[in-house]
Image (spheres, helix red, strand yellow):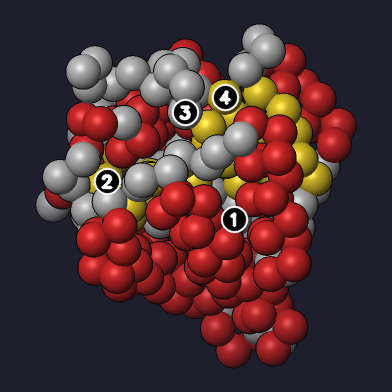
Amino acid sequence: MKLFDLTGKVAIVTGGNGGIGLGMAKGLAAAGARVVLAGRNEEKARRAVSELGGAGVFVAADVTSQTACRALVDEAVRQFGRLDILVNNAGTSIRKRPEAFTEAEWHSVMDTNLTSAFLCAQAAFQPMKQAGGGKIINIGSMMSLFGAPYATPYAASKGGIVQMTRALATAWAADNIQVNAVLPGWIDTELTQNARRQVDGLHDRVLHRTPAGRWGVADDMAGAAVFLASAASDFVTGAAIPVDGGFSIAG
Ligand SMILES: NC(=O)c1ccc[n+]([C@@H]2O[C@H](COP(=O)([O-])OP(=O)(O)OC[C@H]3O[C@@H](n4cnc5c(N)ncnc54)[C@H](OP(=O)(O)O)[C@@H]3O)[C@@H](O)[C@H]2O)c1
């Protein structure tokens, strides 16, 4: 058995049309998987699919909807005959002090970051079980561990990702489905370019605290994705693995 080989495997990466999702999708494709990129922005998706060099297709899906998550999984199985790997990466943030959030803003962040991951995992369960097992990788954050005054719903959703990961891992271990979370540190993407515009001094604070001495790039996320998607992690479940250049362990 080749520990990190994904030949013949089929993956869905939500939000795989850019940023961290695309970094992970490229890693999965390089290890041999065929990858369904799910998202809303078709223009971005066209560029992303071309970066996967024939290993990827795009399926338009708003993953806050249960119907859309089910349709996404059905479409992956229709096109490729199976589903082995689900990366729940779609995410967003609205940055404000807690007292300024509207109810709709709260729900929009929670639905995009947390509910979507639950709905896609639920949709993926049957095809994974039928295939004899599967891998679910949920994307948390440093805000799964820490708080920030501008990130109440984001931190709540990312803390929830870790606990949901543990609950799903216990539920589906007997079906040979491993469920793990990756907690990215500060990675240079559209999301954090906005954060740097909105939060004074963020860029330098991150640099100062990160032992690796740099911001991450999307490609830094590929290795953890391949590990958690492959046989190399068959006895790893319910874990939350930081990929953060040491940010979370720096004093
Ligand atoms: N960058 C970081 O430093 C960092 C750190 C920790 C955690 N994260 C997490 O990593 C994940 C990816 O973030 P990123 O930094 O790569 O940001 P990004 O470039 O903004 O990517 C977010 C992706 O999510 C998709 N998305 C958002 N809402 C969606 C919806 N309703 N349905 C389907 N797709 C949706 C977007 O696709 P469309 O444009 O097509 O909607 C986009 O491709 C997020 O969960 C984020 O919280 C990022």
Residue, disc 3 = 9
Q: Are marks 2 and 4 in contact (CB under 8 Å)?
A: no
Q: Residue at x 86, y 32 (%)?
A: 43
217, 115: nearer the viewer: 115
Label 2 to label 4, Cα distance in Å? 26 Å
Are there few (<14), some (14-19), or many (20+) residues within 10 Å of tag 3? many
**Secondary structure under the numbered disc 4 in the rendered image:** strand
Q: Are marks 3 and 4 in contact (CB under 8 Å)?
A: yes
Residue, disc 4 = 34
Type of amino acid at the residue the image marks with label 3: Lys
Residue, disc 2 = 242
Are there few (<14), some (14-19), or many (20+) residues within 10 Å of tag 4? many
Type of amino acid at the residue the image marks with label 2: Pro
Ligand 1 within 8 Å of disc 3? The answer is: no
Quadrant housing residue 247:
top left
**Secondary structure under the numbered disc 3 in the rendered image:** loop
Position in image of residue 157 (x %, y %): 48, 71
Label 4 to label 1, Cα distance in Å? 22 Å
Residue, disc 1 = 91
Ligand 1 within 8 Å of disc 1? The answer is: yes
Earlier residue among tags 3 and 2:
3
Label 3 to label 2, Cα distance in Å? 25 Å
Earlier residue among tags 1 and 2:
1
Say whether residue 55 is left or right of residue 84.
Answer: right
Say whether residue 231 is left or right of residue 73.
Answer: left
Q: Are marks 4 and 1 in contact (CB under 8 Å)?
A: no
Label 3 to label 1, Cα distance in Å? 24 Å
Q: Farthest top residue?
A: 53
Type of amino acid at the residue the image marks with label 4: Arg
Label 3 to label 4, Cα distance in Å? 6 Å
Which quarter of the image is occupied by the N terminus?
top left
Q: Farthest right residue?
A: 43
